[in-house]
Amino acid sequence: MSCVAEDIGTHSLRKGSSSYALGQVNGPTPVSVYLRMGQSLGKLKDRYIHFGEGADQLCGRMIAGLPFNSERFGVLPPHFPPPIISMMTVEYWDEIVSGYSNYPRGVQSAFPFLLASVIHHEQFLRESLTPNHPIFKARVFTANVLLQQQRGATVLAIGESPVCGLKATGIPAHLAVAKQVNELREEVANLHREIDELKTDMAAKLPNEVAVKVVSELRQQFVVNGVAPVSLRDIDMRIADLRTNMVAEFRSALNAAQLPNATAVANISGEQQPVWRSWSWGDGQICHAVPKDWEFPARASVKAIWNLWFFGDKDAGIRPYRLLSKQHDIKPEHRMRHSRVSVVMSYMEQLVEEAGALPASVTKISALQVPAADKVFDTAFTTMLSQLYSMKPKRPEDLSCGTLYNRLCQYRRSQQSA
């Protein structure tokens, strides 16, 4: 239930049942609940008994902008089916959400719904936002190993989820009836469609099928001098059938002979296939490591750039940004961004080395797992902020590499003058 252990037990069975009964839209009246509870409530009435029939849930749905006069008013939030949820382990969330284990359990339980909503509306986001928007540089896209399985797997249901026990609350009774009427209307429409298709098939196919059947019966019964009449059309049909059968047999034999070798080649190519892609720009040069219209990010946060710099963008197939060629892959108008990011990342690597933040067996940040790299980043970023700012800035997680680059240049000049 994602509840804090100390909070369990604040409601007795009597008070909890009354809250549930009065939380239903068009449910029992408060007076009937008083009578059912069968004893004086005293001050509990003002705290646990309210005169709004499911008003909180109802208002929440209306404020969310759901159409009140439509069955879609009872829509559930996008969510994943249980097979997808079972793959979202703690290790997976540590890869997607920095510091996931530090969040309260109640917040952790909301992450699957937040992720499902982002994945469900991905097409809308890509159509509405620019390709270089920071959300597409976030780890939900760049480091999500389950992204391909999650795309198209989100469930959007009305009233009750078909894959889990999720149910909508705050739904007026007339909308529940409207949902059933709409389902009945769809069934009737499907039935009419099937009947129309059947009529069309009968009108188009039945005469030919009857004619073929009649000819077949006549040939079986009509014999001239003990021999059934055979036309050129019959011979052509028999030859075509024989050709089809022979081709199928040859293909089956060839596939059986080539299957072991093909499987071995597929396994080898699968093991050697790189994660990163290459693109041709049509400029006569060798393939590039980024698409032709790709832009080096300008407004992404330092943490987002850190992830892209050392671990790349797996969704887009772009290798770690530190491996990109400034002259070959970065457009001239974006090379200044690359240079500034390179300076900031190099300085952070220096801070990591000075702090001894890397494990003894690891020499490179890129060799770390993402959760371990998060801890290393926190160490270097905290040290860097203490050097570049006299007071901790507000919302440091939103600082960009360009801002830190300017601060770093000022810091180095002050160190040289001192």
Image (cartoon, rainbow, N blue to C red):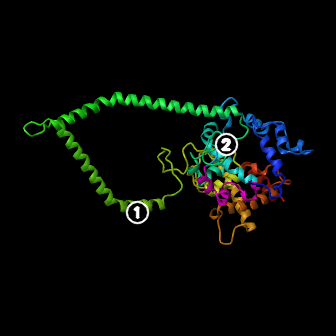
- Give the residue number, with chain letter if any, for mark 1: 264
x and y percent of residue 242 in the render? 22, 46
Residue 229 found in image quarter: top left
Q: Is residue 90 magenta?
A: yes
In space, the residues marked 1 and 2 are separated at their CA atoms by 45 Å
Farthest residue, direction right: 42
Tell me which amino acid carries mark 1.
Ala
Circle 1: element type: helix
Please identify, in this view, whether the residue under mark 1 or under mark 2 is nearer the observer. Answer: 2
Q: Which mark is residue 293?
A: none
Q: Is residue 154 left or right of residue 41?
A: left
Query: 63 and 26: which one is in front?
Result: 26
Region in magenta? 81-105
- The crowding category of the residue bearing disc 2, from other C-alpha atoms within 10 Å (few below 14, some 14 to 19, many at least 20), is some
| Residue found 74% across the figure and 67% down from its top | 354
Rendered-image quadrant of the N terminus? bottom right
Please give the count of numbered marks on the rendered protein.
Answer: 2
Q: Where in the figure is residue 263, as x and y percent of width and height?
A: 40, 60
Instruction: Left or right? Give the position of 58 relative to 274.
Output: right
The residue lying at 64 percent from left, 62 percent from top is 369
Type of amino acid under label 2: Pro
Q: Nearer the viewer, residue 399 or 44?
A: 44
Residue at 73% x, 36% y: name it.
61
Residue located at (54% from left, 32% from top): 186
Secondary structure of the residue carrying tag 2 is loop
Q: Give yes or no for contact between labels 1 and 2 (Cβ–Cβ under 8 Å).
A: no
Q: What's the mark number on residue 77?
A: 2
Point out the tag, 1 or 2, that comes first from the N-terminus. 2
* Of residues 318 and 173, the one drawn nearer to the viewer in this rendering: 173
Q: Position of residue 71 (x, y in %)?
A: 65, 33
Residue toward you, 31 or 126: 31
Quarter containing the C terminus: bottom right
